Image (spheres, grey):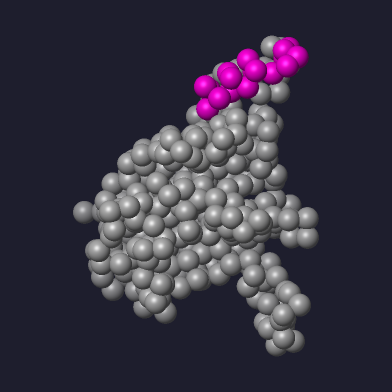
Amino acid sequence: MECTKDSALVRTRFLILSDTHGTEFPLENRPIQDADVAIHCGDLTEESKMEEFRASIRLVKDIHAPLKLVIAGNHDFTLDIVAFRKKVADARPPLDPALVREVYGEYGGARQIFEDARAAGVIFLDEGSHQFLLENRAILNVYASPWTPSLGDWGFQYPPAQGRNFEIMKGVDLVITHGPPKGIMDYTESKQRAGCSDLFGAVARARPRLHCFGHIHEGWGAKMVTWRDQLTERPSHFTDINNERSIVVEKLSGFRQSEFDTEESKGQKSQKTEHCRRERCYAISHCTGDANPLQFGDQTLFVNAAIQGTKEHPLQLPWLVEVELPKAP
């Protein structure tokens, strides 16, 4: 990638996906674009089986990117050894240990699959801060977390009333989480917001360039948020977003036809759908010279990249996103 007019910045391309749930794309649906960084935001599996992890690793390896960053999701519970042990201990009738090892691997076995894939550029990220020097000479500072609020018994989950401290450093470039912040592309089919308010507050204070996630499949889409100059003591999507200067980049309703569409809007949606199917992704760029260049420190681009869709639309599109990163000294 070439530097932008500001020689201190490098145009950098991210291929983002989430919630593949052990499914390998059919060959005709696999992303074909080159990227500097590929990101998988968790739920690599449906039932955390070893063969599902292997399928997801094959999928990630096939992406044309020298660096591939992966986090866990709640379905990937064998990566959360505490949750894994509890599931086995609580099973009634008791499970055959040999069968557990055969299907789910040893405790820590799923993690070893990722260690074995490091030579292919696949890096599994634990919760916390990470830094990478990219091949395009950009510096990428990342915060990652697989944790989501829930009262269920899956992996990497905490009671909503308990809350969680997401220690996102101010000035971070990229935040990768499994779930969304509350108020950002987190509407469920029942029209309830399922995002995390603690995560929203942490992201609002840190103001990263890009925050990507999945988990809420029907929330697929992207939004460029402009922050208010002064944040409230407990930031929320009601009080701390400048809505007049924020834009919805895309959401599922931009593709799916409804009874309220005119013939013109139906045609536009069909054309857009066909174009994206050919490209096998939804591509956007927010760099210097683009229509909506990202203003670092004032804006954050949020991307929900959940791939698993509905029976009518089983595969949602991955995202190809270009933003600018600081160039290495």
Is 92 in the magenta? yes
Tell me the quarter of the image containing the C terminus. bottom left
Residue 25: horizontal and vertical position, in percent?
A: 70, 50
Residue 228: horizontal and vertical position, in percent?
A: 30, 67
In the foreground, 323 or 91: 91
Residue 279: horizontal and vertical position, in percent?
A: 63, 67
Q: Is residue 178 left or right of residue 130?
A: right
Image point (55%, 43%), residue name? 42
Residue 289: horizontal and vertical position, in percent?
A: 36, 78
In the displayed image of the protein, which residue is found farthest to the left?
329
Q: Is residue 78 left or right of residue 198?
A: right
Q: Is residue 239 left or right of residue 20?
A: left
Image point (52%, 22%), residue name? 82
Give the residues drawn in magenta, as a range: 80-96
Tell me the quarter of the image containing the N terminus. bottom left
Asked if 118 appears above or below 318 in the picture, the reply is above
Asked if 156 appears above or below 172 in the picture, the reply is above
* Residue 282 visible: yes
